[in-house]
Amino acid sequence: MSEPKFTPRVFSGIQPSGGLTLGNYLGAIKRFVSMQDENFETVYCMVDLHAITVWQDPEDLAHNTRELAAGFIASGISPEKSILINQSQVPEHAQLAWIFNCVARMGWMGRMTQFKDKAGKNTENVSLGLFAYPALMAADILIYHATHVPVGEDQKQHLELTRDIAAKFNHDYGVDFFPITEPVIEGAATRVMSLRDGSKKMSKSDPSDASRINMTDDADAIAKKIRKAKTDPDALPSEVEGLNERPEARNLVNIYAALNEQSVEDVLREVGGQQFGTFKPLLAELAVSKLAPISTEMARLMAQPDEIDKILAKGAAQAREITAPILKKTYEIVGMVS
Ligand code: AQP
């Protein structure tokens, strides 16, 4: 058998645009952690350049970047097993993004639902960066020749665009240089919904703090948010089909299943027939037992910001061993004289 052309390599990132949420943890970080022990090189990133596509207070951005790094490590991402970086310390991300701005088509970018959601009716006033965001995301991934990208469901369209950009670059320049990346969207909670509205994604920038569980929330705050979570008056069903048309019930059951590493079917076998008054305290207890050790460790790490900065500096140096040669080769392919 011939050797695969590309080293199996995982890249994924999270924006330091606020604190980490349970959505980020269940949709992305849990899978980041498990992929470290599979047959991959793993690179995980605080995407600070993405965060500034909407306004970030500079002090908050620096704080959130370190806190996100602490969240990654506290959740089980080991700087010994993975390369851990903040995007702006590895300049090749932004350099490749410019090339990709010239590969991606306006029509492709205009179809991105995240841009439409975030820009709303305000398209004239949002930053150019928000529109170009998916080209930078493609560069984040492809500057590592990453083959696999674990993400939540909401990022599926951006990953399809990443594949389109890689394919167009390879086609236009007559090369087989960038891999066609595989999205990894797995688990019981690939789309965690707002606790206040089952039709909206749980998001760190939602103005309502009650809509999300933050990884830094204490036990009381978690219990209170779950107790107040929107539900319907019916008991939980015993079969998955019984969750149809019940988005809030489905969301809480999905969260329970993902936290307890069970299938939704198994959870419903145990809790089917229960009223929310019984199920919500069970869910709160489970959430606190899983999240409290992470938030305690995050607080410990955040007391030593210099240590976090050292980890990120080491990660950037390791990352550039991969990214610098890939950028150099890209420039050669494109015809840049060096
Ligand atoms: N609610 C969610 N359910 C499952 N996965 C989620 N992710 C985010 N929210 C959920 C996954 O977390 C990773 C990082 O996302 P991001 O921070 O880069 O951007 P985002 O998807 O736009 O997340 P937020 O929380 O909604 O941030 P803001 O509010 O700043 O836009 C991705 O893998 C994402 O799928």
Image (cartoon, rainbow, N blue to C red):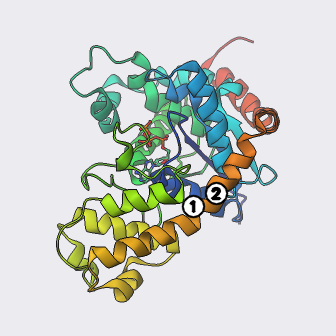
Quick one: label 2, few (<14), some, or many (20+) residues within 10 Å? Answer: many
Query: The residue tagged with tag 2: helix, strand or loop?
Result: helix
Residue 122 picture location, percent across and down: 25, 20
Residue type at tag 1: Leu
Q: Looking at the image, in which quadrant does ligand 1 appear?
A: top left
Q: In this view, does 270 lie to the left or right of 120?
A: right
Q: Which residue is tagged 1?
A: 291
Q: Residue 294 carries which label?
A: 2
Query: The residue tagged with tag 1: helix, strand or loop?
Result: helix
Task: State the residue in front, 57 or 169.
Answer: 57
Residue type at tag 2: Ile
Identity of the residue furthest to the top in this view: 337
Q: Quadrant of residue 223?
A: bottom left
Residue 233 picture location, percent across and down: 17, 71
Q: Can residue 172 be seen in this view?
A: no
Residue 98 picture location, percent across and down: 54, 19
CB within 8 Å, label 2 to label 1: yes
In this picture, is 314 found above or below 237? above
